Image (spheres, helix red, strand yellow):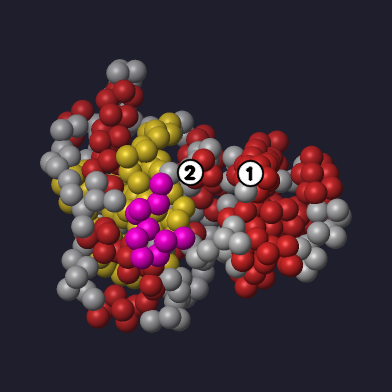
């Protein structure tokens, strides 16, 4: 078992170091940066894009209905943006409307999470937007934790802003990954749950006007990946400061790794590669190249580890299944990331090679 643990730690640290560190009636607004509005409570609009996730979405929404908060939070709404689901999501929302008193839903044809989040922001009544994903189950003090952290951030920023301009801050909560569908909030925090992202929409709270000023999400990101980090680059240029908010905990559910998931995972990595190059076209910097794995270092790393692609979903299938059968699905997933990352790197460079040269 100690050997298995050592292998797991090796592949996790390798993947984390190279890839994960870079890795959807307007109310009287709070306007915390405005001196006259400073004492007023926040109204949250929780925006949740969803696509064919009805079972876990139900847990997500019921957890949001069970919030406990003080006078810092005036009220909140939950906006579910259905991105063309075919699993009966909209029908379920209508049938359970009496249990979901804070929820209202809007729908669009399948256009991806960027367009869905934009639609939610545009329709929001709140002054502050919280983005979470539809497979996230939050704790009872989730909204209160974001409000407390925002308020503290506003106070700290105000001390340095003589002109009392709107404070340029947003909060980013904790995301704990879990495979426990029945009781997702029982999962302990793990080293693999750490994120170094600046702005990611899995659990973030930000004043609505900053999103509008930055230009919202770029709807050209219709495939998987990067639409939130790309917006983060624009928010950073506006001078917004990230405030970590570990008390705002969300449990990100996903099924245990199995071989049946691999084709879909490969497809997502290819999509991520294509969207990664779009990200780089908008922000051609070395930092973005590192994020999207568009460097010679990533080519060499994943090319060597996958033996030029010889270690792939077919050749590694018996070993991965052996690990799964022995109760090590997470270790199997970390090892599978070798060829998944190789697919990603190849997709980035394939997208680059298709770009017309001037």
Q: Residue 265: percent from the left, percent from the top?
A: 63, 64
Where is 296 relative to 228, above or below? above
Question: Which residue is depicted at the point 52% across and 34% down?
Answer: 237
> Can I make out residue 111 in this image?
yes
Q: Residue 240: percent from the left, percent from the top?
A: 43, 33
Tell me the number on the disc at residue 2: 1
Decide if residue 242 is on the left or right side of residue 63.
Answer: right
**Crowd tier of the residue under label 2, counting other residues whose Cα lies within 10 Å: few below 14, some 14–19, many 20 or above:** few
Asked if labels 2 and 1 touch by Cβ distance under 8 angstroms, the answer is no
**Crowd tier of the residue under label 1, counting other residues whose Cα lies within 10 Å: few below 14, some 14–19, many 20 or above:** few
Question: Which residue is depicted at the point 50% across and 35% down?
Answer: 236
> Can I make out residue 271 in this image?
no
* Magenta region, residue range: 179-188
Where is 312 relative to 228, above or below? below
Q: Earlier in the sequence, mark 1 or mark 2?
A: 1
Decide if residue 257 is on the left or right side of residue 215.
Answer: right
> Quarter of the image holding residue 285?
top right
Say which element carries label 1: helix
> What residue is shown with label 2?
190
């Amino acid at each position: 078992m100690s050997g298995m643990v050592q292998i797991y730690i090796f592949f996790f640290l390798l993947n984390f170091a190279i890839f994960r560190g870079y890795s959807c009636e307007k109310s009287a607004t709070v306007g915390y940066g405005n001196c006259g509005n400073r004492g007023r409570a926040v109204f949250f609009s929780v925006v949740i894009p969803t696509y064919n996730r009805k079972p876990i979405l139900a847990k997500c929404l019921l957890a949001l209905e069970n919030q406990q908060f003080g006078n810092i939070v005036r009220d909140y709404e939950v906006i579910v943006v259905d991105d063309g689901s075919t699993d009966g999501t909209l029908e379920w929302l209508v049938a359970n409307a009496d249990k979901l008193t804070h929820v209202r839903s809007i729908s669009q044809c399948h256009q991806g999470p960027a367009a869905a989040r934009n639609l939610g922001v545009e329709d929001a009544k709140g002054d502050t937007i919280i983005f979470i994903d539809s497979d996230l189950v939050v704790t009872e003090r989730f909204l209160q934790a974001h409000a407390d952290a925002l308020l503290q951030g506003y106070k700290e920023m105000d001390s340095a802003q003589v002109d009392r301009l709107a404070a340029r801050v947003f909060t980013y909560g904790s995301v704990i990954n879990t495979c426990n569908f029945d009781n997702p909030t029982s999962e302990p925090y793990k080293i693999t749950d750490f994120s170094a992202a600046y702005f990611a929409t899995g659990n973030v709270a930000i004043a609505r006007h900053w999103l509008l000023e930055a230009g919202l999400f770029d709807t050209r990101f219709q495939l998987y990946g990067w639409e939130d980090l790309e917006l983060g680059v624009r928010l950073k240029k506006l001078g917004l400061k990230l405030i970590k908010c570990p008390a705002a905990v969300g449990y990100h559910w996903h099924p245990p790794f199995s071989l049946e998931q691999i084709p879909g995972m490969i497809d997502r990595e290819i999509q991520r590669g294509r969207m990664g190059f779009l990200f780089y076209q908008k922000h051609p910097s070395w930092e973005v190249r590192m994020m999207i794995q568009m460097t010679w270092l990533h080519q060499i790393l994943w090319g060597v580890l996958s033996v030029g692609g010889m270690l792939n979903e077919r050749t590694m299938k018996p070993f991965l299944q052996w690990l799964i059968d022995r109760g090590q699905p997470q270790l199997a997933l970390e090892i599978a990331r070798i060829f998944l990352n190789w697919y990603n790197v190849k997709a980035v460079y394939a997208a680059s090679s298709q770009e017309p040269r001037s």
